[in-house]
Image (spheres, rainbow, N blue to C red):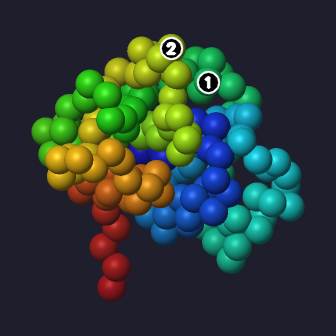
Amino acid sequence: MRLSFYQPDIPQNLGTTIRLAACFGVKMQIIEPCGFPLTAKALKRAVMDYDNLAQVERVASADSFFEDAEKLSERVVLFTTKGATPLQDFHFRPTDRLLFGRESAGVPDEVHARCEGRVVIPLVEGARSINVATAAAIGLFEALRQTEGLTTFP
């Protein structure tokens, strides 16, 4: 299971999701370019004291991301508000890459079209969307729950 973020544009959300991935023991991918300078120093600051747990990979482009997923036979599952299966009805696999779009614009249509699965987190009528870090936490937990990937802590 991997958490993947397409060209994130809010540094604080990226830091939150890096810590989320670290705490659940999953790899995280950042598909560049980011909407802010992502220097090695900025990444280290975002990881904070989770650098021993965080598994962060920077991916040069969406093309590279999808080529690698295809090579490894990993399915890309996009979390989106458009034309998607409700989270509770989607069946995750342990090798899925959970993809989240930019906070400001989601993903472009060509990225949307390349994803094998599309998931929506149901919200009350009139609510447009939730914070991407919150969506990632909800989506990752459900995917790990379904695939028995949750770690049991003493």
Left or right position of 89 against 127: left
Q: Measured from the top left, where is residue 81 in percent x and y?
A: 32, 35
Left or right position of 44 against 8: right
Sequence-first disc among 2 and 1: 1
Which residue sits at x=50%, y=14%?
110
Q: Measured from the top left, where is residue 136 in percent x and y?
A: 42, 53
Say which of marks 2 and 1 sits in front. 2
Whether residue 55 is visible here, answered yes or no, is: no
Quarter of the view holding residue 7: top right
Q: Is mark 1 on a helix, strand or loop?
A: helix
- Is 109 rendered above or below residue 76? above
Which residue sits at x=70%, y=35%?
32
Which residue sits at x=20%, y=32%?
85
Q: Residue 132 carries which label?
A: none
Q: Name the residue under label 2.
A: 110
- Is 101 rendered above or below residue 49? above
Query: Could you tell me how far apart the alpha carbons at marks 2 and 1 are, in whole angstroms?
Result: 10 Å
- Is 43 rendered above or below residue 126? below
Q: Measured from the top left, where is residue 113 in percent x and y?
A: 42, 15
Numbered circles on residues, count: 2
Quarter of the view holding residue 1: top left
Q: Do the residues labelled 2 and 1 touch (CB within 8 Å)?
A: yes
Left or right position of 13 against 139: right
Whether residue 83 is visible here, answered yes or no, is: yes
Task: Between residue 77 and residue 96, name the one nearer to us.
Answer: 77
Quadrant location of the C terminus in the rendered image: bottom left
The amino acid type, in three-letter code, at marker 1 is Ala
Task: Between residue 104 and residue 37, name the one nearer to us.
Answer: 104
Q: Mark 1 points at which residue?
A: 62
How busy is the neighbourhood of tag 2: few (under 14 within 10 Å), some, or many (20 plus)?
A: few
Which residue sits at x=44%, y=55%?
131
The amino acid type, in three-letter code, at marker 2 is Glu
